[in-house]
Amino acid sequence: MTLCLPTLTTATTDLLLNGCVIAERRNWTVLKASGPTLRDYLQGQITQDITKLSDSCGIHSALLTPQGKAVSELYLLNSSDDELILLTPSSSAHATVARLRQFALGHTLRIGIVDAMGICSIQGTHVNSALELLGLNEPQASWLSYSHRDAVFAMVMPQLPRGYWIIAAKEIIEKLSDTLHVVDETEVEAMRIMRGIPHFGIEWDATMHPLNANLIEFNGISFDKGCYVGQEVSSRMHWRGGIKKRLYQVSIDGLPEAIPCPIRTTLNIGELKSAAMNHEGNCVGIALLPIATAESKNTLSLENGVRVTLLEACHA
């Protein structure tokens, strides 16, 4: 049976170059957290320094267990002085809420899933027209910069081509979908993989330490903010050279037979975590590989003999 990969079609590529497309992001969930000591509490829970969060720039982070295992990946945005918007993979949304409630002793914390809000991607050359419909200014060019108005957020995400994540009430997203050309979420997934943006629950999970999933390269961790849950393991890996593997962008001269699948030199040394087809019919992917192997430029292949070419480490 032929493996079905996320594919960016020629038709969507033309729309991106000449207009604007929209796609729901059903695999992400919106949370809200509030409370007078919320920021102090989160500072001791998440990997990134919450003081870096501002009214125009979000932060990327992870939530860890005391053993340093990942609970979830997070994006945080300011909503008000004592309320934050948290974006987390849908597969780990309930675990994230439970984990943050579990250790909130001594804090007045309110956190939960906001079913009324959703996330979509708007992308393309004329993406500004969509922002105008929402009454939003264009965010700054930097990753995770955002603009917001009346509980509607537009955040810069590192996807191809130019575009934003919109976080808003689901009825607002539905109205926007009536105006723009709707594409399937799998095409946005193809663009994400082409750009080399790993997501928790797909390219990495609780079996991988976040530093092996390029959390440093995606500015998702602070090593000087002080203690947080899982900090000891993360700091030891960083300062003692314990990061032995990393996620890389790769091109594939053919098709994998399954995802995930081993990557070989003479032995299995890594794993292809995801793959997608671009509009020219070329296969690209995200692979977990030993850093030493990547730096040695050894010839890589899949088990079926298809050649794998390493492009670069995944980064923001």
Image: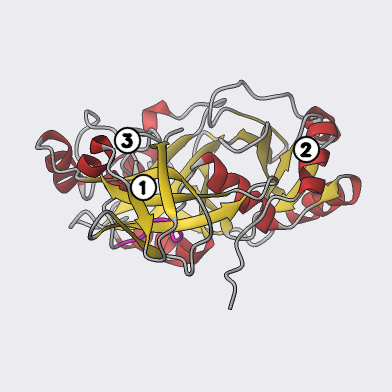
Name the disc covering residue 260, or none.
none
Find out whether residue 113 is within the magenta segment: no
Find out whether residue 201 is within the magenta segment: yes
Q: CA distance from mark 3 to mark 1?
A: 11 Å
- Residue located farthest toward the right when viewing the structure as drawn: 179
> At x 37% / y 37%, what residue is drawn?
220
Most common secondary structure along the magenta stretch:
loop
Hey, what amino acid is under mark 3? Answer: Ile
- Residue located farthest toward the top when viewing the structure as drawn: 140
Circle nearer the viewer, 2 or 3: 2
Q: CA distance from mark 2 to mark 1?
A: 31 Å
Which region of the structure is painted magenta? 200-206
Is residue 104 at least partly visible in the picture? yes
Q: Quadrant of residue 137?
A: top right
The disc, 2 or 1, on the residue closer to the chain's N-terminal end is 2
Name the disc covering residue 216, or none.
3
Circle nearer the viewer, 3 or 1: 3
Q: Residues within 10 Å of mark 3 (few under 14, many from 20)?
A: some
Residue at the disc numbered 2? 16
Q: Position of residue 64 (x, y in %)?
A: 29, 53
Q: Residues within 10 Å of mark 1 (few under 14, many from 20)?
A: many
Hey, what amino acid is under mark 2? Answer: Leu
Hey, what amino acid is under mark 1? Answer: Ala
> At x 53% / y 56%, what residue is drawn?
254
The disc, 3 or 1, on the residue closer to the chain's N-terminal end is 1
Q: Position of residue 228 (x, y in %)?
A: 23, 44
Name above or below for residue 122 compared with residue 145.
below
**Helix, strand or loop under label 3:** loop
Determine whether, in the image, residue 233 is placed left or right of residue 90: left
Quadrant into which the N terminus falls: bottom right
